[in-house]
Image (tube, rainbow, N blue to C red):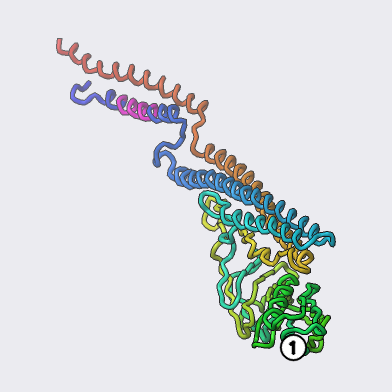
Amino acid sequence: MKINNNISAVITNKQLLRTEDTLAASMERLSSGLRINHAKDDPSGMAIAGKMNAQIDGLSRASRNSSDGISVLDTADGALTEVTSMLQRMRELSVQAANGTMSENDRAAIQKEIGNLVEEIDRISEATEFNTKTLLDGSLSNRVYGDHFTRPTPSSTVEAGFYNFTVNAAAEQASVAINVTNGLTYPIPSDQAGSITINGAAAMIEAGMSKEDVIGSIRDAAEIGGALIEITDDDTVTVKSEYYGVNEHVDVVSNSTLVLPTGAEHQTGKNADITMDAANSLFKDHPTATIKHEGNHITFTDVEGFSLSMKLEENFEGAIKCEVTDIGPMDLQVGANMGQQITVRIPSISSEYLYLDEVDVSKVGGPERAMTRLDEALATVNDIRANLGAYTNRLEYTVSSLNATHENMNSAISRIADVDMATEMVEYTKDNVLQQAGTSALSQANELPQMALQLLQ
């Protein structure tokens, strides 16, 4: 029997301390609901849970990002709905203007409404925004750089890089050169009076008119007939079509003694002659690409959906380098990791890019041209809306997928990091009983040295 070292008490106290540590850990798990409260609880589990928590937070943010993207697309589509309505109204007015019962004043009045609708389309293009980001002005489409062309419009399948080509011969306007002294003397005598028609619009040549009066009459008729004039010298007036290409024409007929050049009754323009540089640009990846000509407006297309259109500089001939970049489109972060993005492209719907600046029903042949241009504009806008709808449907599925993944990741991390309350309560109850038993045993072990006093009595 020893007094200085109570081995029984030391052993009991050691076990009691272990029980208290276990009980404290159990109480921490029960109060926090977590199986892993410190790295020492499960080092590998803590590492896995940490990475999974980052993924869960990222998935939650990505889901909200996708929802924001849907809001952007809905905003753009809402604006395009009104643009479509305006284009349909403009086409309706063009059909009305094409009716033979309409006078020149009637067509001019119709053109005023069309002009206002074109201005409103431009306003929508510039003013449609989401969080200060303009949506319909082309800033969300691929940027295209180069000289000697305007209005570049690449499709979503056009890869970034150079698309080089050569303009061998520029597009030409239809033209007729009129020498106003050929068959006429000034002032006009009565036997030379009459008229000439330019695309069906009459220029009156009346007795007593001076040369300047005749040129003014030709200029007025050309404007109504949808043509331009150029005074090349004192005696020559060249009548030109307003636009370029083989579909443009100038028809000049003389009903007076004025003598016109041969073929003046019907002259047509020419399309540009273009050669693609497949050897030194990405045209080599599109061996089936063809060129659609419409005067200075050209479009490169192939059977795989590749499309790159632009308007060439007038009268330019030579090599052109066209660089398409990946700058501009909106990248929506729809995943928890780098590179998990959906790229959204929205082309410009301004009147310039829809070629609405060529719509003028007040001129001869204007209503027919307007209907063609408006059909093309409607097709362009409908294609843009179809792409927006496809983006929206994709993002809706993306949101559903992200939410499902978020749910499964939460379930997985719960199995790793969350405590099983029933099991932990069993452990807590056991440790609680052991603590009480240990306390009682320590109390008794501390009384053992008191028995040594009985030997001294």
Per the image, is 14 magenta? yes
Classify residue 261 as left or right of residue 401. right
Frontmost residue, 153 versus 53: 153
Say which quarter of the image contains residue 63: top right
Frontmost residue, 51 versus 294: 294
Predominant secondary structure, magenta span: helix
Say which quarter of the image contains residue 199: bottom right
Residue in the image at 55% along x and 55% along y:
134
Residue at the left extreme? Answer: 456
Residue 342 drawn at (x, y percent): 60, 56
Residue 411 in the image: above or below residue 243: above
Residue 92 drawn at (x, y percent): 78, 55
Residue 269 drawn at (x, y percent): 75, 81
Residue 274 visible in the snapshot: no
Residue 454 in the image: above or below residue 388: above
Frontmost residue, 92 versus 66: 92
Residue in the image at 72% along x and 51% along y:
85
Residue 34 in the image: above or below residue 185: above
Residue 103 visible in the snapshot: yes
Residue 171 drawn at (x, y percent): 69, 81
Residue in the image at 76% along x and 66% along y:
366
Residue type at the position of mark 1: Thr
Classify residue 410 as left or right of residue 283. left
Identify the secondary structure beneath mark 1: loop
In the rendered image, the quadrant that contains the C terminus is top left
Crowd class of label 1 (few under 14; some 14 to 19; many from 20; radius 10 Å): some
Per the image, is 16 magenta? yes
In the rendered image, the quadrant that contains the N terminus is top left
Q: Which residue is mark 1?
A: 185
Question: Magenta part of the protein: which range?
Answer: 12-23
